[in-house]
Amino acid sequence: MSAQLEQIEQTLQSQPDQHLEFLAKKDIIARILELREEKNVLILGHNYMEPLVYQLSGEKERGDSLALSRYAAQSDKPIILFDGVMFMAETAKILSPDKKVLIADATAGCSLAEPFKAKDVLEYRRRFPHAPVVTYVNSYADIKAESDYCCTSANGLDVVLHASKTFNSNQVIFFPDSLMGANLQHDVEKQGIDLIYPGKYDENFGRCEVHEQFKVEHLRDIRLQYDIPKHSEEAAILVHWECRPEVIAEADYYGSTSQMAKYIADHPHLKRVFLATECEMAANLASEYPHVEFVRSCNLFCQHMRKITLEKILYSLEHEVYEVNVDEEIAERARKAIDRMLEIW
Ligand code: SF4
């Protein structure tokens, strides 16, 4: 058994259900790891991947989408396999144009990214001609290419404030997440900024189909049922930026996936945590923090992320499919929007 295979088994041993699955799929995992070495492939694993897929990636090769794409751009490996959804693989291609980027299922989409095209951004620009455009990284390349800045859920607030100041505009257009837009609006309105996001002045909206399902009543029920009082040192409810404003208001902490993980790392007295986000993130953190009980709601999962399975990863590596390509001119402009974000954060 290879050293990494042994390590994966050890990591999953504290979670009996995952260990059982590991034993059932050990041969596929071993073959994927062999191919990774033979073909010199960098396998990136998003926080929302199921634990067996997530563990295929080394410690520095797991995390949120932009951090992974930036990491891949520094790597000398000629092939990147992105275990995540299509917009993430596209971002990796934008930052690593000379590498071959693969995704195990090219239909793995995203309810946030899907509804909007470049023409929608152009239409908003026409309606609000002086407002800079900030686009959340959960979007396709053509939208990024029409934007002044990209942002992540970790730096959205800073980027919006910077864009407003740089363009001397109290209006800023934000694409494509309506709920994150409403959350950011709450934070920036004190500074006189009018954030324009889909759904605010029209009928369109973009929402994460997972995060929008969390309701404030769910969180209150979970607090009572699992004894997670507010302001406790030992228990906490952590919520993703893509949730509804009233859900954010009920949380003990809100942030991006990496900020939520950091919160747990920074609070060693925590014994019980509920994460209002894709349920596999809690499964992955449970292996890392076996002393913490993660209350999980696995009826709320991302159908797009679930498309990335071990079997499809094996097929993709064996046949070097499905390759992700981005039109060079679009990629160049999208890269500028990402670079402008990186210059300030
Ligand atoms: S969890 Fe939400 S934002 Fe992430 S890929 Fe799925 S639908 Fe898109």
Image (cartoon, helix red, strand yellow):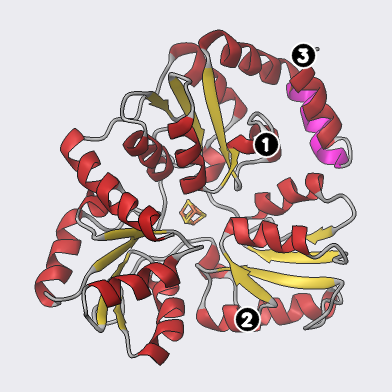
Q: Position of residue 225 (x, y in %)?
A: 84, 76
* Residue type (three-letter) at the residue carrying disc 2: Val
Residue 208 forms part of the magenta stretch: no
Identity, as a three-letter code, of the amino acid under mark 1: Glu
Q: Looking at the image, which residue is at 70% across and 39% down?
A: 51
Percent across and percent down for residue 211 are 54, 65
Res 203 seen here: no
Residue visible at 58% across and 12% down? 35
Q: Are marks 1 and 2 in contact (CB under 8 Å)?
A: no
Q: Identify the residue under disc 3.
A: 2
Quadrant position of the N terminus in the picture: top right
Indicate which label's residue lies in the foreground, 1 or 2: 1
Say whether marks 2 and 3 touch (CB < 8 Å): no
Tag 3: amino acid: Ser
Q: Nearer the viewer, mark 1 or mark 3?
A: 1
Tag 2 residue:
216
Q: Which residue is mark 1?
A: 59
As drawn, 101 above or below 39: below
Say what secondary structure mark 2 lies in: helix
For the stretch drawn in magenta, what is the main secondary structure? helix
Point out residue 208 in the picture as x, y percentages from the top left corner: 46, 62
Where are the magenta residues, as a range? 15-25
Residue nearer the viewer, 128 or 200: 128
Q: Is residue 16 magenta?
A: yes
